[in-house]
Image (cartoon, helix red, strand yellow):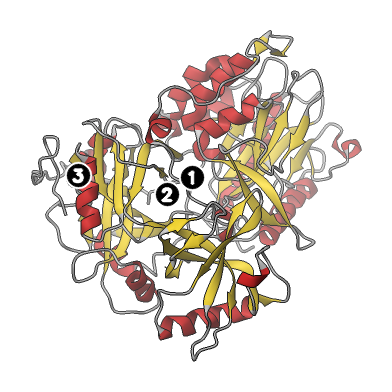
């Protein structure tokens, strides 16, 4: 693998620097918590120039390693704790000479030529004997300090002080070069590698998909939903797998794959598929192409390589690589390379029509000003609302006129607003919208959106909650002090149950008390816990709290809205503007700040610069994040 370059295109080993001891090294720092990862945009060719560094694209599972003083945990890209599956990597990470760190990277299995082998990785995770390797490529936290605001190249310099670039052990440093990315891609493709990841050297780490990280592939390959299989007329388990992708909120037929496996893998896959078989087709497909089909509940995801995709969206010369346990079918869409110029343009791609239209008449705030706020706040807002099913509050003619909710979309917003098919109670699927980029955020604003509300789960697994929200909503006439006191009391009660919480003023009248969760518990458990907790609070202090939705029961009390914690329910997203007088904003705060605030609508869209600075402050480092499970009581 190429070594770190000090000059464009020149390979040279990085000098080893030992991490200096700091006062914090004598402290026992808490285990860093999982962060939503930054994602790369697929582009049609590698960017040129010395502003970019280029790394190998690995063929494995994205993993975050959280380390502190001899302890370590491994998390998947959706935040699941896979420490047991990656036990050798976790054990090796415990030996790194660092007080605490959160390291982003890729878990792989290397073949005899040193290439990452996805099928071998799959076999290893199922009990095989191949050796796991972790390539570290980014540093998100170090000794309790947030590193994400530092330039990419500086984060890598600090990372190489922890992970020796010369190491050939289980935990290794991902080398890079500066410039000459096309040359590197040509070399990698000639060696049978997957491709190149290109990163802006001066960019901060932003937990979304944007133009600062780009990927260019040697071969076309991606994930597909397995919709069924066709029978074989030969002595083998099946002829092919029927593939699909999410498009416009439904599954679209994407062709079949009939090669790439051995007899053992075919037997294993068929054993997994049979319990998922259903009677009717789960995707519309040409009858002639799916004769003798066995249809499946859309729960499996397969990685597939292919030569090309036809104009009809079907694969040609497809080859099976393996099933992916770290990806959920709801998140599978067709990947199409973006033109490099469009992916890296500094000019906003979304034009805002009618920028002078007044949306907040009492303050004279226009659509253009609203768009400017969301453009400025996008990088700190997207980690909370990206890749999460959304409900929008749209007010095309302004907040004083007709506003309406929208959660379904069949593609009317264009390519920057994505759709995910979610199964409803009646067994049908509906198209829910989500975003993953600043352009998606601005597209919603262009279409009249003021407020963004999100599910308590991400599209990687919509059935598992990653947060618990108690919305403390005071009756008319109750002062904000009553809400402040209630929030602190809820914090203390939840802490007794083992849950750390964080406050957010809603931009309305109330406060959200938010407990982040490792996505393990499913919605029925989460709703049951929230309901029991809210009822207990109301029974203990009936003059202060009510858990009843009826407004008549709220008189003089605070409504403990636990209903945010059920499948399909939403809560206002951090940094979202509210469709209220003065354009107030929902803002994360500290518990100390809450004591001195006099209202829940303290900030408004004119405070974008301050909110951006606050989000990067030490006081709010770690806000809304935590490795904790729903209590079992």
Q: Earlier in the sequence, mark 3 or mark 2?
A: 2
Q: Residue at x 40, y 24 (%)?
A: 346
Check if mark 1's residue and mark 2's residue have beta carbons within 8 Å: yes
- Image quadrant containing the N terminus: bottom left
Most foreground residue, 428 or 562: 428
Image position of 197 (left or right of 301): left
Front tag of 3 and 2:
3
Residue density around tag 1, few if under 14, some if 14–19, many if 20 or more, within 10 Å: many
Residue on which disc 2 sits:
33
In the picture, measured across the screen, residue 273 lies left or right of residue 347, that is right
Relative to residue 510, is residue 266 drawn left or right? left
Q: Nearer the viewer, residue 27 or 114?
A: 114
Mark 3 surroundings within 10 Å by alpha-carbon count, few (fewer than 14), some (14 through 19), many (20 or more): few
Query: Percent position (x, y) of residue 433?
Result: 64, 43
Which residue: 12% across, 45% down? Answer: 18
Estimate the spatial distance between the alpha carbons at disc 1 and disc 3, rounded to whole Å. Answer: 40 Å
- Badge 2: residue crowd in 10 Å (few <14, some 14–19, many ≥20): many
Q: Earlier in the sequence, mark 1 or mark 2?
A: 2
The image shows residue 355 at horizontal and vertical percentages of 62, 13
Residue at disc 3, secondary structure: helix
Q: Is residue 92 above or below residue 209?
A: below
Badge 2 marks a residue whose secondary structure is loop
Report how far apart the C-alphas of labels 1 and 2 lie in the structure: 6 Å
Residue 566 shows in the view: no
**Quadrant of residue 40 in the image?**
top left
Residue 183 badge: 3
When asked about the image quadrant of residue 84, the answer is: bottom left
Q: Nearer the viewer, mark 1 or mark 3?
A: 3
Q: Secondary structure at mark 1?
A: loop
What residue is disc 1 on?
A: 625
């Amino acid at each position: 693998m190429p070594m770190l370059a000090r000059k464009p295109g020149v390979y040279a080993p990085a000098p080893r620097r030992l991490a200096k001891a700091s006062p914090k090294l004598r402290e026992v720092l808490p285990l860093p918590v999982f962060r939503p990862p930054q994602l790369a945009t697929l582009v049609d060719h590698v960017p040129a120039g010395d502003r970019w560094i280029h790394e190998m694209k690995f063929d494995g599972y994205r993993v975050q390693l959280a380390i502190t003083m001899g302890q370590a945990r491994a998390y998947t890209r959706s935040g699941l704790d896979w420490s047991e599956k990656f036990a050798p990597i976790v054990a090796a990470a415990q030996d790194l000479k660092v007080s605490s760190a959160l390291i982003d990277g890729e878990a792989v299995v290397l073949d005899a030529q040193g290439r990452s082998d996805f099928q071998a990785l799959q076999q290893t995770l199922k009990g095989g004997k191949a050796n796991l390797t972790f390539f570290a490529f980014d540093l998100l936290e170090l000794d309790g300090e947030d590193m994400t605001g530092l330039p990419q190249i500086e984060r890598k310099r600090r990372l190489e002080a922890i992970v020796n670039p010369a190491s050939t052990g289980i935990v290794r440093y991902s080398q890079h070069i500066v410039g000459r990315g096309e040359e590197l891609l040509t070399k990698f493709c000639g060696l049978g590698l997957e491709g190149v990841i290109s990163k802006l050297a001066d960019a901060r780490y932003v937990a979304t998909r944007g133009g600062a990280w780009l990927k260019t592939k040697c071969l076309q390959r991606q994930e597909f939903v397995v919709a069924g299989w066709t029978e074989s007329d030969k002595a083998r388990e099946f002829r092919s797998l029927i593939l699909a992708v999410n498009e416009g909120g439904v599954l679209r037929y994407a062709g079949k794959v009939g090669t790439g496996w051995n007899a053992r893998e075919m037997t294993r896959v068929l054993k997994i598929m049979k319990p998922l078989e259903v009677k009717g087709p789960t995707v519309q497909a040409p009858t002639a192409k799916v004769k003798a089909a066995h249809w499946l509940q859309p729960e499996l995801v397969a990685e597939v390589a292919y030569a090309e995709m036809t104009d009809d969206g079907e694969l040609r010369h497809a080859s099976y690589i393996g099933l992916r346990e770290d990806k959920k079918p709801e998140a599978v869409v067709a990947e199409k390379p973006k033109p490099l110029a469009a992916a890296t343009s500094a000019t906003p791609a979304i034009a805002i029509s009618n920028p002078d239209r007044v949306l907040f008449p009492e303050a004279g705030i226009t659509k253009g000003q609203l768009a400017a706020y969301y453009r400025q706040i996008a990088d700190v807002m997207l980690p909370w609302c990206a890749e999460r099913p959304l409900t929008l509050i749209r007010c095309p003619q302004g907040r004083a006129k007709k506003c309406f909710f929208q959660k379904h979309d069949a593609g009317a917003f264009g390519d920057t607003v994505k759709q995910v098919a979610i199964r409803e109670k009646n067994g049908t699927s509906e198209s829910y919208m989500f975003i993953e980029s600043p352009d998606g955020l601005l597209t919603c604003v262009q279409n009249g959106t003021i407020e963004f509300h999100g599910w308590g789960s991400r599209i990687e697994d919509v059935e598992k909650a990653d947060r618990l929200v108690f919305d403390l909503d005071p009756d008319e006439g109750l002062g904000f002090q009553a809400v402040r006191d209630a929030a602190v009391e809820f914090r203390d009660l939840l802490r007794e149950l083992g849950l750390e919480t964080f406050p957010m003023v809603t931009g309305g009248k109330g406060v959200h008390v938010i407990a982040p969760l490792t996505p393990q518990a499913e919605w029925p458990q989460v709703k049951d816990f929230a309901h029991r907790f809210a009822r207990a609070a109301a029974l203990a202090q009936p003059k202060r709290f009510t858990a009843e939705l009826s407004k008549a029961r709220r008189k003089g009390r605070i409504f403990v809205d636990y209903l945010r914690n059920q499948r399909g329910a939403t809560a206002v997203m951090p940094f979202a503007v509210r469709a209220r007088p003065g354009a107030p904003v929902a803002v994360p705060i500290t518990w100390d700040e809450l004591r001195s605030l006099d209202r829940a609508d303290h900030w408004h869209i004119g405070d974008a610069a301050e909110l951006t600075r606050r989000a990067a402050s030490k006081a709010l480092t770690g806000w809304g994040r935590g490795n904790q499970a729903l209590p079992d009581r």
